[in-house]
Image (cartoon, helix red, strand yellow):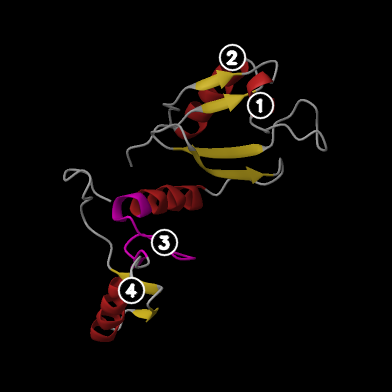
Amino acid sequence: MNTDLLGLSVDSNSSHLAWMYDIFCRTGIQISFPIIADRNGQIARKYGMISNDVSNTETVRNVFIIDDKQIIRTILIYPLNVGRFIPEIIRIVQALQMADCSKGSTAANWMPGNPIIVPMPHTYSQLEDRIKYIEENRNGISWYLSFTNPPEICEDSKSKNC
C-alpha cells in the first residue's frame, strides 16, 4: 500500500523485544516495523497520546496516518480497553490514497472499488456540463454531488495503482 508502519510505546526496549518475541513464538508472525521506546513519554505527550484522565503513564491507543509530506491526515484514538480495528485503518489509507489520486472524494461508508465523488464544478459552464453528464450517465443527485468509477491508475504516477 506504499506505507510504512512505526510503533511508539512508553515501554522499554527490553519490553518491546519480549513482546515481539512472544508474538513470534505464539503466532509465527515477525514484527517487521520499528518500535520507538519513549520511556519518559515526551513524544507521546506531544502527540496527545497520554490521557491524564486515565493515567499519567499509560498511553491510549492512537493511530496517526501521516502522508509523505509529513502532514497528519487522520488521528484515531481508542481507549485502553478497546483494540484497534485494522480493516478500518486499511480502508482509511485506501480512501486517502484514492481521494488524492483521483482528486475526488470518498463518500461515507466508501469501500475500495466503489464510485468516488466527482469534484464540484467551479464555473457555471462546468455546472451545466455536470448536469448534462448526470442526465446522460444517471450517476448523481445534483450538480454538486455526482459520482464516477475510480481510476485504475493514478494520473500523477502512471505506475502506481490508486
State the residue at coordinates (50%, 53%): 88
Q: Indicate the amino acid at tag 2.
A: Asn
Seen in the picture, residue 60 relative to 34 is either above or below; the reply is below
List the residue tagged with mark 3.
Answer: 106
List the residue tagged with mark 1.
Answer: 46
Seen in the picture, residue 8 relative to 1 is either above or below; the reply is above
Q: Where is residue 63 in the image (x, y as percent from the top left)?
A: 56, 39
Q: Which of 82 and 57 is in front in this view?
A: 57
**Could you give the CA–CA distance between mark 3 and mark 4, rounded to whole angstroms?**
24 Å
**Could you give the CA–CA distance between mark 2 and mark 3, rounded to whole angstroms?**
39 Å
- The numbered mark at residue 13 is 2
Mark 3 or 4, nearer chain start: 3
**Could you give the CA–CA distance between mark 4 and mark 2, rounded to whole angstroms?**
60 Å
State the residue at coordinates (30%, 51%): 101
Mark 4 or 2, nearer chain start: 2
Task: Tell me the SS state at disc 3.
Answer: loop
